[in-house]
Image (spheres, coloured by chain):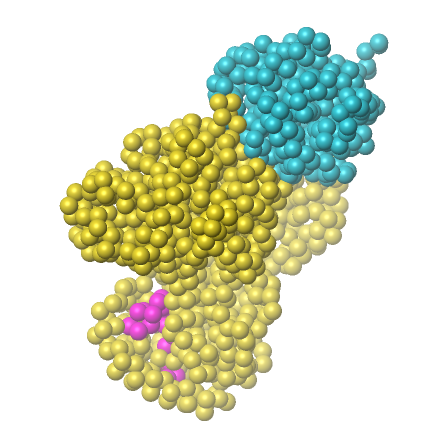
Chain colours: A cyan, B yellow
């Protein structure tokens, strides 16, 4: 079983929410980035969601756009990003899910990209600008190396299509908590709960909510709305820009730990209906 | 229409008409009229004969009795408001007293598919009837009071020869005697109100209608009708009603139509699958996405289910709403069972009195009342008033046989209208066309061997929905829809709307009118004598610079703007490079009353100032984008981000033949008029096709527009000219030369990119060609070798602006100048055979570039 799937299964057994922090690989430079990834891993989230920097991300707000630009300015390439992940692997077994765009994958060659990802221990890949219609080659390449293809489900997706998305997904479904691009918003959208309920009827996979989750309150909020966990990006990525370099890893760790604690303190409605928790 | 009290008015109107017609007879002789007559293809009689009472809705500005009805009279706008409700439109064409004109017929004809009745005072049937047809009428009004028997009959026959019908209006019994005795009138109009116009005189209507119908003729009731109850009272008497004043005098025309009993007809029917008996059925219904399912709770019925199973089925549904079907229970029993099953809708399938309906509606349930056709029709109205949704069915129900729609003649159809009874996928289209139901209900039609059959159910739902039209998403390996999942439903919606619009003659007519009257199509094809002499070929310039707005972009935004309105969007957003697309979007936004937000690279905002000013003058908001190189690529990124957040009420008007599917198809579909016009003009003028077609290529819309008409003519060479910038060794925008296969902005195409797949910044002196991508169709044409792509550098383009200005007195845009530079270079290299026919697409005018060119000359900017 993939490490990422095992981590999510454990969260479900322990009847607690899951949490994955997100950062852009190589932001603000490879060495600092490695320190930040280690700091995140030390906060014991269930996995890390990591973005490959891209010059023109169409679904990202200013915070993540800026992170991409910083990493690219520091000379990060697909190759060096994978090398960074390799270095992380030497120090941590934390499961990893990658968030990437189509063009860098095509430039590397689809199979070569997924093979390299598997080599450095990536368990799942979400291609942000590849919907169902275009997913064929990417899903095939992922399955060949036992990487889970992850897809987005949104409040605007019709019910029938949600079923198709669920059928094609592995590991988890990335549920958009907001209609819009990445970036923090206060509170939880009222559209999230019906979307989660609709998905719930169609799949047993964990449903993780992402986009716009600002802090511990929102993490608890999305889990109470029916998600199995949360993915938090911009709220952490912004620290890279706002915090002096020296104190950054500690601050990143503290913020991540608070988010993880918030997730653990909430019980996803679905696992509440399961058998009693394992005795620890 | 005219009361005896206003005899004097009528006499004056008729006298004026005689004079006017005499004058017109001299101006446009009858022979000239007849030469251009085409028979009508819209059946007024068919509209009258439809099941149910039909609505003829009238447009007029004023009347002698009521004065001004509509101060800002716009017959087309009114006809559009009537569109989804009226079966025919009556158009007043008399000017002095009613404020109409013959030209109103064509204005209205463009915006509605319904047959048009010309309401006028015909005094000279031999002239005015052909005249009416020539002006676009499908039926004419003949007044028995004004015309003698011979004229009436001549008019009726002449109208029929032209594919039209005559509505013969009678005032009283004496008129009717003559019409019935001496003419072959098929449709007779009578006044619903008594002579003093105070109240509907049903007795009078009855007497007259009985006599008319006796001969198999149709009855149209006119005058003063405004409420549904009045139409219900006409049951059995009138085939159609003509309504004008009550609609025209209303502030809210849609509400007035609803009050009359003619709400907007549905664009598609809801589907109810009846007789679910298992959890699998529930899942099937959910998967098919039907709106309703029926669960039979009638003891002893073949499809009945017990309470526990019924509750489980209802609970298993995800999407469809469950309707419990009952027969002849009292309200309390129905309510108890519905509550136990968790239902919010019930169907009464017996002889329940209206009190049961009323009680259940008061309890908050949706109540469907099955009405057997024809036996139950007499009780229908009471249930309507009690708040039920009517479901027409065959007497007895559940028999698998359809009812005869002839029973519904002269009965006001209840709205919303449900239809059940022997419906099957195979002939559903007929039912949908005849009754335009809001809901179709099926049970036996989806059974095989007495069991609900998933394949039949799917076929039925497909037939009810109509097949969703699709456009091809790829050009070879290029194209596709590489976007975040969030944008997919919006793109699917646009694709469907465009495919439907392409098949809709009304859309074409409205777009054609805008293109001709507002934008100035067709644009000229100018013979460039001096260029021709210099380059040794026959060179023609396609003058898209003369299109309103100054560039070819307007054609695309007019079409997409109409699509946006068709989808009910309230806002347009767009990216823009040089600003021409931004200006064109701002223009259509102003014209259609939509908000407009334009995203433009900050660098382009600075070098194309006049266009920014124009956008703002047209009422658009311009958002400078500072990211990246602050040019077109970054504007598209930001527009896509904005669209992600606002996709439900906003239409993204894409400016070029790139972007995610369906944009490349839409833009090519709209811009191909350029090449079509070139082709027609050259064939007419030169008797043959061009040898070469030149166009500049940024995203590629003007080029694909020029090329599309010639793709299947291999003897026509297609040449695209990209931005060479500082030269291929420096910074440029020559994507097809230096790019690789990749994905940018939703499409697989050629992309200027690093080895790593990061997108590179393009460069060009021209904002519109400054783009590291290119439309997928161009990528395909390049791969096929069907089109040849070359470049022109910044310096060559700047020089070409001046050269074209001095040689042919045309100031072209910097974008176009790239094509001009390549044409000049290749001409001087001797590429053209003597007398070769060459067309260059002048994609836009150069006023926007004057400041920038001046500053470039000073060395102030790049």
Q: What is the count of numbered marks?
A: 0
Which residue ends up furthest to the left in the rendered image? B834
Picture coordinates of residue A59 (x, y %)? 60, 34
**Residue at the image point whose x is 50% and y is 84% from the top:** B64
**Residue at the image point whose x is 55% and y is 69% from the top:** B247
Q: Residue A181 vs residue B225: left or right? A: right
Q: Which residues are magenta?
A: B130-147
Residue B735 versus residue B76 in the image, above or below = above
Indicate whether residue B132 is drawn in magenta: yes
Picture coordinates of residue A217 (x, y %)? 81, 32
Q: Is residue A128 visible?
A: yes
Picture coordinates of residue A269 (x, y %)? 77, 26
Q: Residue A218 vs residue B103: left or right? A: right
Q: Residue B159 vs residue B60: left or right? A: left
Q: Is residue B442 visible?
A: no
Indicate whether residue B51 is drawn in magenta: no
Q: Nearer the viewer, residue B214 or B128?
A: B128
Which residue ends up furthest to the bottom in the rendered image? B8
Which residue ends up furthest to the top in the rendered image? A90
Residue B218 versus residue A168 in the image, above or below = below
**Residue at the image point whose x is 44% and y is 45% from the top:** B766
Q: For residue B121, which quarter of the picture?
A: bottom left
Q: Residue B546 vs residue B856: left or right? A: left
Residue B715 versus residue A121 in the image, above or below = below
Picture coordinates of residue A236 (x, y %)? 74, 28
**Residue at the image point whose x is 66% and y is 22% from the top:** A29
Q: Nearer the viewer, residue B667 or B827?
A: B827
């Amino acid at each position: 079983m993939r490490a990422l799937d095992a981590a999510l299964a454990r969260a479900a057994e322990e009847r607690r929410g899951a949490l994955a922090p997100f950062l852009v690989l190589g932001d603000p430079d490879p060495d600092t980035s490695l320190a930040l990834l280690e700091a995140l891993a030390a906060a014991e989230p269930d996995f890390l969601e990591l973005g490959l920097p891209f010059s023109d991300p169409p679904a990202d707000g200013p915070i993540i756009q800026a992170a991409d630009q910083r990493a690219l300015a520091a000379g990060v390439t697909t190759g060096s990003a994978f090398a960074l992940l390799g270095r992380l692997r030497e120090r941590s077994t934390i499961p990893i899910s990658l968030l990437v765009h189509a063009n860098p994958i095509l430039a590397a060659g689809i199979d070569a990209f997924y093979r390299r990802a598997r080599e450095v221990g990536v368990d799942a890949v979400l291609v942000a600008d590849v919907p169902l219609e275009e997913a064929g080659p990417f899903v095939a390449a992922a399955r060949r190396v036992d990487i889970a293809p992850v897809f987005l489900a949104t409040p605007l997706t019709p019910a029938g299509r949600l079923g198709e998305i669920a059928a094609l997904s592995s590991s988890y479904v990335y549920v958009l908590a907001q209609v819009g691009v990445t970036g923090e918003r206060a509170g939880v959208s009222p559209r999230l709960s019906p979307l989660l309920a609709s998905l719930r009827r169609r799949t047993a996979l964990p449903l993780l909510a992402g986009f716009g989750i600002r802090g511990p309150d929102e993490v608890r909020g999305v889990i109470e709305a029916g998600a199995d966990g949360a993915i938090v990006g911009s709220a952490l990525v912004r620290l890279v820009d706002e915090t002096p370099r020296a104190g950054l890893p500690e601050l990143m760790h503290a913020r991540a730990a608070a988010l993880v604690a918030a997730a653990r303190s909430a019980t996803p409605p679905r696992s509440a209906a399961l058998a009693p928790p394992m005795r620890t | 229409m005219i009361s005896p009290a206003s005899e004097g008015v009528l006499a004056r109107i008729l006298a004026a008409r005689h004079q006017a017609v005499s004058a017109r007879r001299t101006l446009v002789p009858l022979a000239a009229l007849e030469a251009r007559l085409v028979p009508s293809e819209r059946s007024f009689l068919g509209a009258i004969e439809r099941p149910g009472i039909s609505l003829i809705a009238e447009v007029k500005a004023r009347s002698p009795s009521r004065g001004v009805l509509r101060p800002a009279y716009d017959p087309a706008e009114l006809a559009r408001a009537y569109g989804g409700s009226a079966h025919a439109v009556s158009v007043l064409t008399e000017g002095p007293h009613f404020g109409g004109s013959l030209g109103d017929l064509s204005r209205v004809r463009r915006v509605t598919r319904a047959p048009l009745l010309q309401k006028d005072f015909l005094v000279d049937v031999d002239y005015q009837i052909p005249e009416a047809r020539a002006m676009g009428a499908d039926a004419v009004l003949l007044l028995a009071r004004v015309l003698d028997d011979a004229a009436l009959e001549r008019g009726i026959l002449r109208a029929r020869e032209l594919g039209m019908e005559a509505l013969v209006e009678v005032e009283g019994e004496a008129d009717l005697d003559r019409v019935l005795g001496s003419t072959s009138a098929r449709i007779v109009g009578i006044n619903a109100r008594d002579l003093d116009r105070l109240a509907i005189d049903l007795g009078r209507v009855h007497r007259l209608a009985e006599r008319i119908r006796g001969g198999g003729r149709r009855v149209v009731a006119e005058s003063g009708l405004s409420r549904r109850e009045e139409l219900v009272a006409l049951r059995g008497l009138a085939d159609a009603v003509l309504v004008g004043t009550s609609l025209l005098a209303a502030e809210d025309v849609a509400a007035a139509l609803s009050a009359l009993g003619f709400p907007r007809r549905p664009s598609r029917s809801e589907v109810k699958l009846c007789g679910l008996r298992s959890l699998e059925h529930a899942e099937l219904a959910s998967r098919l996405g039907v709106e309703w399912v029926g669960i039979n709770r009638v003891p002893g019925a073949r499809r009945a289910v017990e309470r526990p199973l019924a509750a489980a089925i209802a609970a298993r549904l995800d999407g469809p709403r469950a309707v419990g079907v009952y027969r002849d229970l009292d309200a309390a029993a129905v309510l108890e069972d519905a509550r136990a099953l968790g239902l919010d809708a019930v169907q009464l399938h017996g002889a329940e009195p209206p009190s049961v309906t009323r009680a259940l509606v008061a309890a908050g349930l949706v109540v469907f009342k099955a009405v057997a056709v024809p036996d139950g029709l007499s009780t229908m109205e009471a249930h309507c008033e009690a708040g039920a949704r009517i479901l027409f069915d065959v007497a007895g129900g559940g028999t698998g046989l359809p009812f005869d729609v002839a029973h519904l003649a002269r009965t006001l159809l209840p709205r919303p209208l449900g239809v059940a009874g022997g419906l099957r996928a195979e002939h559903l289209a007929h039912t949908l066309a005849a009754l335009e139901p809001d809901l179709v209900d099926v049970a036996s039609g989806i059974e095989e061997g007495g069991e609900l059959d998933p394949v039949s159910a799917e076929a039925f739902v497909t037939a009810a929905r109509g097949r969703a039209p699709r456009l091809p998403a790829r050009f070879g390996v290029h194209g596709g829809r590489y976007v975040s999942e969030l944008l997919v439903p919006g793109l699917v919606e646009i694709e469907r709307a465009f495919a439907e619009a392409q098949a809709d003659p009304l859309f074409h007519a409205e777009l054609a009118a805008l293109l001709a009257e507002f934008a100035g199509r067709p644009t000229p094809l100018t013979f460039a004598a001096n260029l021709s002499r210099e380059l040794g070929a026959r060179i023609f310039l396609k003058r898209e610079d003369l299109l309103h707005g100054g560039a070819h972009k307007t054609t695309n935004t007019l079409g997409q703007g109409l699509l946006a309105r068709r989808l009910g969007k309230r806002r347009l957003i767009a990216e823009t490079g040089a600003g021409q697309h931004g200006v064109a979007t701002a223009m259509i936004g102003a014209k259609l009353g939509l908000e407009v937000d334009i995203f433009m690279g900050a660098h382009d905002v600075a070098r194309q100032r006049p266009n920014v000013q124009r956008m703002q003058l047209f009422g658009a908001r311009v958002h400078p984008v500072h990211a990246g190189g602050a040019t077109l690529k970054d504007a598209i990124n930001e527009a896509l981000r904005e669209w992600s957040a606002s996709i439900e009420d906003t239409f993204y008007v894409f400016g070029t033949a790139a972007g995610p599917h369906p944009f490349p198809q839409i833009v090519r579909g709209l811009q191909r008029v350029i090449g079509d016009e070139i082709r027609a003009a050259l064939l007419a003028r030169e008797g043959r096709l061009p040898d070469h077609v030149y166009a500049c290529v940024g995203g590629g819309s003007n080029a694909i527009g020029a090329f599309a008409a010639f793709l299947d003519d291999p003897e026509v060479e297609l040449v695209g000219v990209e931005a060479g910038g500082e030269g291929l060794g420096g910074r440029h925008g020559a994507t097809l030369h230096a790019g690789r296969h990749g994905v940018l902005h939703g499409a697989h195409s050629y992309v200027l990119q690093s080895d790593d797949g990061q997108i590179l910044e393009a460069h060009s002196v021209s904002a519109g060609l400054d783009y590291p991508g290119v439309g997928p169709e161009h990528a395909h044409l390049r791969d096929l070798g069907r089109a040849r792509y070359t470049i022109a550098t910044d310096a060559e383009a700047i020089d070409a602006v001046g050269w074209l200005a001095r040689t042919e007195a045309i100031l072209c845009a910097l974008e176009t100048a790239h094509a001009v530079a390549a044409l000049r270079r290749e001409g001087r290299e001797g590429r053209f055979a003597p007398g070769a026919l060459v067309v260059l697409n002048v994609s836009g005018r150069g006023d926007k570039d004057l400041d920038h060119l001046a500053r470039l000359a000073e060395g102030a900017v790049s």
